[in-house]
Image: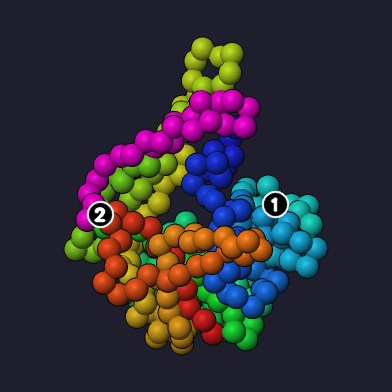
Amino acid sequence: MDRYDLYELAVTYPPRLARFIDAVHGRRPRILREDFSGSAALARHWAGLSPKHTAIAVDLDREPLARAAGTPRLAIRRADVRRAHDRADIIACTNFPLGYWHTRRDLVAYLKHARACLRPRGLFIADLYGGADAFEPGRTTTRLRGPGGERIEYTFEQRSADPITGRVVDALHFKVRERGRARATIIRDAFIYDWRLWSIPELADAYAEAGFRAIEVYNTLGDAIDQDGQLHVRPVQPGEDLGRSWVVYLTGRK
């Protein structure tokens, strides 16, 4: 398993996320554009939902995009997301990449561009993390099993954090022990990020300035599935407790 395999196993949740995004949109969306797509895990899964679903994956990095080559109904765009003009029902920006924009001016400029690329009644969605420990350096380790029975340790490290500037440096590490092998493979600094950690109100204000309406916050990928298999979702209401540490999805409509 390489670092992209490990990332998709430990960090992303494309089947659940795709169903959640579809339910939040609520109008049978067909075209999804994944900005900052990396290996396009979400876009690949979306394109596989049905013969009517199509996706676009946009990223500057050639290496992870190569993993998505040949996926049916998936178009690949190696480009700056600010130069991508493919129109879509949904533009998804997940796994915290809005943190790449370190200034409000750059953030709002990107959001305006994304909104212009949405089709009528389109949905933009991005995630962010926060909470009481958001600016505390530290590590958390999760143990997983790989598809071949590999024993995997995934470590998220917040290497540095400055609450004055909102900047954090995060790194992802992996330790993999394959079946039948005595020694583990260690991948330190598999991915490193220098992010601006936006707050929910800051991001909501930027959405509004960019022209989005009906801005909502979700803290789960769905609340219930009915007898017809339909996923039901509910936004967080003002005053609800998000807990000490949280990840939320912020949505806005065109």
* Residue 172 position (above or below residue 26): above
Q: Is residue 101 left or right of residue 76?
A: left
Q: Is residue 43 left or right of residue 236?
A: right
Q: Position of residue 93 (x, y in %)?
A: 51, 65
Please give the name of the residue rendered at 38% of the width and 58% of the height, measured from the top-left corner.
Answer: 247
| Amino acid beneath label 1 | Ala
Residue bounds of the magenta highlight: 132-155
- Quadrant of the image occupied by residue 162: bottom left
Please give the name of the residue rendered at 78% of the width and 68% of the height, measured from the top-left corner.
Answer: 52
Q: Nearer the viewer, mark 1 or mark 2?
A: 2
Find out whether the residues at labels 1 and 2 contact each other: C-beta distance under 8 Å.
Answer: no
What crowding class fits label 1: few (fewer than 14 Cα within 10 Å), some (14-19), or many (20 or more)?
some
Disc assigned to residue 183: none
> Which quadrant is home to the N terminus?
top right
Residue placed most toward the observer, 101 or 120: 120
Q: Position of residue 111 (x, y in %)?
A: 47, 77
Residue ID for mark 2:
244
Q: Residue furthest front?
A: 227
Residue ID for mark 1:
68
Q: Is residue 79 inside the magenta stretch?
A: no
Q: Regarding mark 1 in the picture, which secondary structure is present there?
A: helix
* Residue 254 position (above or below residue 90): below
* Residue 97 position (above or below residue 154): below
